[in-house]
Amino acid sequence: MWVLFATITVLLWGTSETIFKKVSTAEKHSVLKLISYNGIILGICAFIFMLITRTKMDWGMIYTYLPVAIIYITSMFCTYKAMTLVKVSILSPLQNSSCAITTLLCIFILKQEVGIPQIVAIAVIIICMVLLSINKDEVLRLESGDKEADERNARRAYLLYLKGIAFALGYLLLDGIGSFMDDYTLEGDLSAEQVIIAYSYIYFVVGVICAIILKVIDKDYKPIRRFKENKLKLIGTLVETAGQYTYIYAFAFGDAALASPYIAAYSIVTIILSRIFLKEKLKPRQYALIALIIAGLVTLSI
């Protein structure tokens, strides 16, 4: 059953990630806007979900899940920020190597067992991840590819690229820890329904806070009146939210050591969609590294 939920999550998150990349590079304050939209939509959906499943609201589950939720929400800030600086076709496989962190934590702390192929896969993922991230050719140049850009601007552009990689690595670490804590929580303290509701309401509060901040720093910020301009963002948020539900159920029915790397393979969907809709192109060497990372992710899920 976990494979079904994980596969749906792969399709949903690959789609939402491509949409968020398009939105994040076209707007100012895009990070706050995405967190605001995600949080508010999640809160509304959680209320409906709570009525459907008849799950009772318990402040204890909010308190229990709060540390995990904060880790996840912080990781989302990192990924949205990284999207403004790095190609999503590189960013996605790099960030989703976080499953290696999850698998290692599950092995050493939860005593979940994996074989030698999985250990080799983790090593391959880490090596390819490093090689993929250190690449001057992927700098988003401030001069729009102008070959006559001076050395100072070129250096500044590369520093911005490295900043994006740093945020991506921040997501990698936080998401890996969060996925591990999810599995630990679902095995003992909370049900899948309680986790979904607790996470959504915590994110809702953060989303409202971000909306207030946006209103203070941008007087023209009127998300409801500008529905047409925000339609793509809203679609991406709804798709992302649906993925949150299937993600939790994938973890509830399976072990994180298997579910996490399997879901991380949504990078395949992201790469395909970014090539079609965002016109992102990579070099053969980069495709080879991504293929090795994805092969490692699949190996971890076996």
Image (cartoon, rainbow, N blue to C red):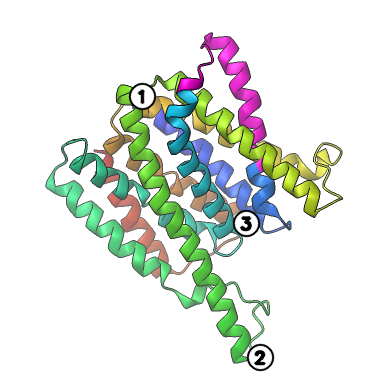
- Marks 2 and 1, the one that precedes in the sequence: 2
Q: Give the number of the disc on residue 252.
A: 1
User: Could you say whether the residue bearing mark 1 is in a helix, strand or loop?
Assistant: helix
Q: Give the number of the disc on residue 95.
A: none
Does residue 5 appear to the left or right of 23 in the view shown?
left
Say if mark 2 contacts mark 1, CB within 8 Å.
Answer: no
Say if mark 3 contacts mark 1, CB within 8 Å.
Answer: no
How far from the left and from the top, in percent, is residue 225?
87, 38
Q: Amino acid at mark 2?
A: Glu
- Which residue is tagged 3? 278
Q: Nearer the viewer, mark 2 or mark 3?
A: 2
Q: Which residues are magenta?
A: 36-60
Among the 4 quarters of the image, the one containing residue 16: top right
Residue that appears at 23% across and 58% down: 123
Using a 10 Å C-alpha cutoff, classify the residue at mark 1 as few (fewer than 14 neighbours), some (14 to 19) or many (20 or more): many
- Marks 3 and 1, the one that precedes in the sequence: 1
Q: Quadrant where the N terminus lies?
A: top left
